[in-house]
Structure formats: structure tokens, C-alpha cells
Image (cartoon, helix red, strand yellow):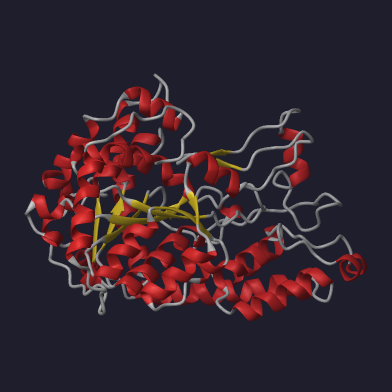
Amino acid sequence: MTKETSTGSAPADEPGQPPKLTTSALAEQAPAKSVAQLITPFEVSGGVDESGKLLPVDYEKLTREFGATPITPQLLERFERVTGKKPHRFMRRGIVFSHRDLEKILDRYEKGEPFYLYTGRGPSSDSMHVGHAIPFEFTKYLQNTFDCPLVIQLTDDEKFMHSKKLKLEDVKRFALDNAKDIIAIGFDPAKTFMFNDTGGIMGTAFFDNVISMAKRITANQIFGTFGFNGGNNVGEIFFCAVQSATSFATSFPHIFGDNPTKVRTIPCLIPCAIDQDPYFRQCRENAAQMKYQKPSLIHSVFLPALQGPGSKMSASIDASAIFLTDTPNQIKNKINRFAFSGGQDTAEKQRELGGDTTVDVPFQYLTFFLEDDEELARIKNAYESGEMMTGEIKQICIRYLQEYVAGFQERRKAVTEEVRQEYFAFKPLAYKGNPNPVKKDAADDKKEGEKEKASQGHTKKMSVGRAKPEN
């Protein structure tokens, strides 16, 4: 069960916001000078302006700084043409907004060549919230679209090493509980392999790749990429190699076979939130030295906390998140009491000026959970024109979130321990890939062979600090 938080009296300029979490209250705690946004696997902040106001995450700036590539309308057109499937609403609406080498995955799918999906979860609590569900919902769509194998890694070791409070038995329990939550998203067990790092995977080819990667990563690279220093424990520094190893098909001989020469050419596509990108920049830098394909990535934005832009939901702050265990009444209360509103102070002003959907949390949530593009556009126009009141858009948001969470909870009831073990079993996976691949000729084979040979003969040093665009 989650805890309710008393709201007290809200500042007059921010009706309905909880004290100490409003923009004005946070401004009082903020430094007098501006603070730049900070996005790492461990911290997410859109920054603070000179007045102390929290800022939304600037994803265009983040894409440039990380050296990633924006997802363009042309790429979406090609995705639909190659797969025969309409791009997911996350892709259509810019929720999934940047990538690394997604074109190469589409090339392989078009030709009927194998690849796999890889994503994961760091289990820090026994219950996931709807923000955690976003990457998994998108991954399920990709699994269904590509009809390919999926590997899901539960990094319980990472959470243990990064927390002074969590015990090893805690994170192991969280991993198994979270595994059942993830299964309830709806993944095909015949195409899915799931594991937690503290389980039996460390005695396999997976760990061979862990130590091979670890040997190539220097301490300076880790310090520069993650902002670590001499005060971080060796487990935190080493974990980058653990997360990287899942990117290599040879880590999973029960899925892809035990011929390393053949299997090492199979790449993966990693759907993840943008804060996980630093791990895979490290991996991509070293993959060629290990004679592996670089993993491809596709990045999503964060589902904002109830308190608004510049933040993301936190499993440790109940008032920031809608949990997958919340009751319909809890969802209603959280949206009504805590969801940051882009509406005006009074009904009269709302009718005159309309609301700001770019900061309005109920509308932002609808962009994630409402499938119908036309209905979303109708709500946007009505709210921005002043035709729709703040209370109305909150009620719409409440209804969709209640439906989503109720559907999840119904599926979660069916996930027994036996079902979980099926996903964790070391078994072959059944998948078909592209049913109508485009045949390639001998000239294509020759070009690809020359390209692969050239790529293995050239590597570059890891940049320390700010990421540079990749060649």
C-alpha cells in the first residue's frame, strides 16, 4: 500500500500543488544562480533558472550532448515501410525521440538477418510505477513488430552497490517481484529470456563477456562518463561491464547457439530511457575491439513526476508517482491533489487564456497512455482554447490511468512463481523475424564484408566527460 501525503495550503499562484513540492517552494530551497540540467543513470534534473524555477528537461540539447541522432519523420516513414506496422504512439509523439544506429537494425530486418532486443530494470523497490512501465510497453511493441528474441536484465547487483541502505536480500527479492510486474506487461514467454545478475547467469558465457569488457574500460573513462571519483566503490565502477555484456549475443548460447564466430555478428537493439545511454556509449566504444557488433539504441523521454516538468517519477517518493499497485481511489486522489496544472488560477482566466499543455501533467500523461491521436488533439485544442477546464482534463487523465493500472493488475494476478520461472529458464526461444525479407545479391555481401573488415581495423579512444558525436 502507498502512503497519502497531506497537502496543507498551496501557494496562491499554484493551486492544487502540495507544499514543499511546488515550483515556488522549491525555488526558495534552490540556489540563487542558475543550475544546468543533469541527466545520468543516477540523477535526473532539468536544471534551475536564475529565479530558482525548475526547468523541464531539454531533450534536444541532451541529444546533442550525448551525440545521439534525432528520430526524423523520414526514419519513421522507413520504419513503417520496412515493418508494415504503424509506428507506436511513443514514436509518433516524440516520446521515443533519438537513437543510435536504428537504421542498421531496419537494414537487418529488411534482409531477414537476426538481431535481438535487450532492455532491463534496476529493482530498487517491490513495486513499479507507471513511469517504469513506459520502456517495457514500447519494448513489447517492438517484440511483436519484429518477432524477435528479447533479453531482460534485472540489475539487482547495481542497486545493491549504489545504495547504502539496501541489503542484498532486499534487492534479490525486489528483482523477483519486479520480474512478475514486467511479465504482466504482456511479453511472449516463447520469445523472452529474463535474468537477475545475482542469479545463475554469472557462471556462463555471460560472465566471460563481463570480464572481457571490464579489461578494456579504464577508471578515467568511468570517472569521465559517470562523474564518479575515488569515493565510489569498485562495484559501482565495475558495473558498466556487467550491463554491457548483455549487449552481446554470445552471452546467451541457449538462445543463439555456441558458435562464437557466427553469433558475434548478431547485434541488439536497446529500448531505454535516455539516462541509461552512458552505459552503452562505453559499450559501443569497446565492442569493435572485442570483434562484436555495436548495440543500437532507441531513447525515450521520462514520464514526469506529478510535480511537473524537470523531474521524473521516483519509486521512493509516493507523492511523485502513480504506482502499479495503486487503487482507483488513490490514482484519483493523486491526480487531483498533486498533478501539476498548466491551467489558469480561476475559471474565468482559463476560459479567456486557456491552459499550457507543455507543462500540464494530466495532458502529458495522456500523451503516454491515450492511443487515439484525434482524441488527443481534440483535448489539446479544447484545453488550450479555454473550452476545457483543469478539472475536466484531470478527470480524463484519471480515467485512462485507472483503466491502464486496472488492466495491469488483472494480468499481474495470473503471474505465479511457476510463470516467472518459465521466463527465467535457460531454454531456446521461438521467433520468426521478417516473414518477407528482401533478398540481397552477392555485391551486397561483398560490400558488407569490406565494411565489417574496415570497422574492425579502426577504433578510437574513449572521450572523457561530454560525449562526442560518433562517426
Q: Nearer the viewer, residue 297 or 139?
A: 297
Residue at (34, 35) in percent of width and height:
161
Q: Is residue 295 left or right of residue 366?
A: left
- Is residue 207 positioned above or below 425 on the image? above
Residue at (6, 54) in percent of width and height:
259
Q: Quadrant of the C terminus?
A: top left
The x, y position of residue 18, in whole percent, is 72, 52
Q: Nearer the viewer, residue 211 or 109?
A: 109
Residue 324 visible somewhere in the drawing:
no
Q: Is residue 7 left or right of residue 230?
A: right
Residue 220 visible somewhere in the drawing:
yes
Residue at (62, 69) in percent of width and height:
366
Q: Residue 38 appears in which quarter of the rendering?
A: top right
**Number of residue marks:** 0
The x, y position of residue 143, in whole percent, is 33, 69
Furthest residue in direction left, as rendered: 259
The x, y position of residue 115, in whole percent, is 25, 61
Q: Is residue 66 left or right of residue 288?
A: right
Residue at (70, 65) in percent of width and height:
336
Furthest residue in direction front, as rendered: 443
Q: Residue 4 appears in which quarter of the rendering?
A: bottom right
The x, y position of residue 354, in whole percent, is 84, 67
Q: Residue 243 appears in which quarter of the rendering?
A: top left
